[in-house]
Image: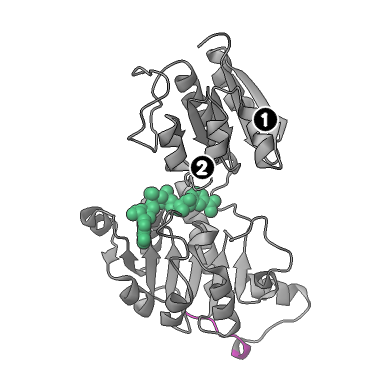
Amino acid sequence: MQGRPKVVRVDRKIDPSSIKEEREELDKVNAELVLAEFETEDDIIAATKDADAILTTFAPITRRVMESSPRVRVVVRYGIGYDTVDLDAATDNGILLVNLPGFCLDEVADHTIGLLLACVRKIVYYNNLTKSGYWARYHEMFIASFTGQTLGLIGCGTIGQAVAKRAAGFDVKILGTDPYVDKAVAKKHGINLVSMAELLKESDFVSVHSLLNKDTHHLVGEKEFRQMKPTAYFINTSRGPVVDEKALIKALQEKWIAGAGIDVFEQEPIDPNNPLLKMDNAVVTPHNAGWSDAAGRRARILVGKEAARVVTGKWPSHWVNKSVKPRFELVKGD
Ligand SMILES: NC(=O)c1ccc[n+]([C@@H]2O[C@H](COP(=O)([O-])OP(=O)(O)OC[C@H]3O[C@@H](n4cnc5c(N)ncnc54)[C@H](O)[C@@H]3O)[C@@H](O)[C@H]2O)c1
C-alpha cells in the first residue's frame, strides 16, 4: 500500500465526538479516518472510491459500492448482523467482511427479558394508566404468571443462549428451534430443541433470535402467529424482516396473540403511522436492544483494531466470509 491508509466511516448520521476509540486505534498505525454521511448509494460510492477500509453501522454496502472501490480490503460492521452488506459481492471481490459477534450479547439478552416482563406484567400499560390519573383495581387486571411458563426461542445462537440463561432464573421451561445449533450446546443451556410447530403450539412466550438472511426473511408470518396460543406474547430483538410485520399487526389487532415486545422493524426508523405505535398490547423500542455505553465503547475499540490490522496487511481476528480470497496479500498478525 502506498501512502497513508484511508479508512472511511460511512453512515447516515455520524456524531464526530463518538469516534475517539477508532481514531486512537487507527492513529497507532498512521491510518487516516474520514467521516462521510450519506443519503444515496452514489454518496457511499463517492465517499469510499479510494478507501482501503469501510466502517459502517447501517449503510448498505452493495455490489455496486464494492465494485466501485478497487482499494477496499475490508468492510467492518459495528454490529453482529451483517444483512446490510452484500456478502456474496464481498467474497467475489476479495473483500473481507468483519462483524463483532457477541459484543452486545448481554445487552440484547437483558433487553429481551425486559420486553418480556414489560409485556407480561403490562408495565408500560399500567404506567400510562396510572400517570393519566386512573388507579386500576385488581379485578380489572388480567396479568399472566411469568414463573413456571414456557419460553420458545427461535434461533438458539449466542443471544438465544444468553436469554435461556436468564430465563432459567425464573424457572421457565425453555424450548428452542434452530436447524444449525449444536444439540449438545443447546442442551447445556437448558434448551429443549423441538420443531417450529411444536414450539409455537407449546410456548407462552416466543422470542426470535435468528440471523437475517435469504432463508430467514419472514420466518415468522401469518401461519406461525395462527399457531401460537391466544395468551402468548411475542418478542423480536433480532432483525425486523425476520418477521412479517403486517402479519404481526393483524395477529395483535385480531387477538390471535396477547401482545408483543418489538425492538426491530421492517422499516427503520419506524413509520410514524405504523399501527404498532398505537396499540396498548405492543411495547416498542428503537432498535436499541444491543446498546449500552460500555457496548458502544467495546464496539468502537474492536472496529478500530480490526480495521487497523487489515490496512496494515494482517488478517483480522475474525471475519464472516471464510472462503474469501483477499484482493491483497495478508499475513497472520498477533
Ligand atoms: N436489536 C439489537 O440491537 C441487536 C443487537 C445485536 C444483534 N441483534 C440480532 O440478534 C440476532 C441473533 O444474534 P446472535 O449473536 O445470537 O447470532 P448467532 O449467529 O450467534 O445466532 C443466530 C442463530 O440463528 C440460527 N438460525 C439460522 N437460521 C435459522 C432458522 N431458519 N430458524 C431458526 N434459527 C435459525 C443460527 O443457526 C444461529 O444459531 C441477529 O439477528 C442479530 O442481528 C440485534
Q: In which quadrant of the rendered image does the C terminus lie?
A: top left
User: Looking at the image, which residue sits at the far right?
Assistant: 133
The three-letter code of the residue at mark 1 reads Ala
In the rendering, at what x and y percent does residue 41 appear? 65, 40
The three-letter code of the residue at mark 2 reads Val
Numbered tag placed on residue 80 in the rendering? none
Please determine whether, in this image, residue 96 is positioned above or below residue 260.
Answer: above
Viewer-proximal residue, 266 or 177? 266
Viewer-proximal residue, 150 or 146? 150
Q: Which residues are magenta?
A: 139-144
Color theme of the render? one colour
Q: Residues within 10 Å of mark 2 (few under 14, many from 20)?
A: many
Q: Main secondary structure of the magenta part?
A: loop
Q: Is residue 297 left or right of residue 306?
A: right
Q: Is 143 a magenta residue?
A: yes
> Could you tell me how far apart the alpha carbons at marks 2 and 1 are, in whole angstroms?
17 Å
In the rendering, at what x and y percent does residue 9 appear? 62, 30
Residue of label 1: 46
Q: Is residue 81 left or right of residue 161?
A: right
Q: Is mark 2 within 8 Å of ligand 1?
A: no
In the rendering, at what x and y percent does residue 107 appear? 51, 49
Residue of label 2: 85
Q: Residues within 10 Å of mark 1 (few under 14, many from 20)?
A: some
User: Looking at the image, which residue sits at the far left?
Assistant: 184
Please determine whether, in this image, residue 296 is positioned above or below residue 122.
Answer: above
Earlier in the chain: of badge 2 and badge 1, it is 1
Can residue 99 be seen at all in this image of the molecule? no
Can residue 55 be seen at all in this image of the molecule? yes
Number of numbered discs overlaid on the protein picture: 2
Instruction: Give the residue drawn at x 57%, y 58%.
Output: 264
Instruction: Give the residue drawn at x 41%, y 35%.
Output: 91
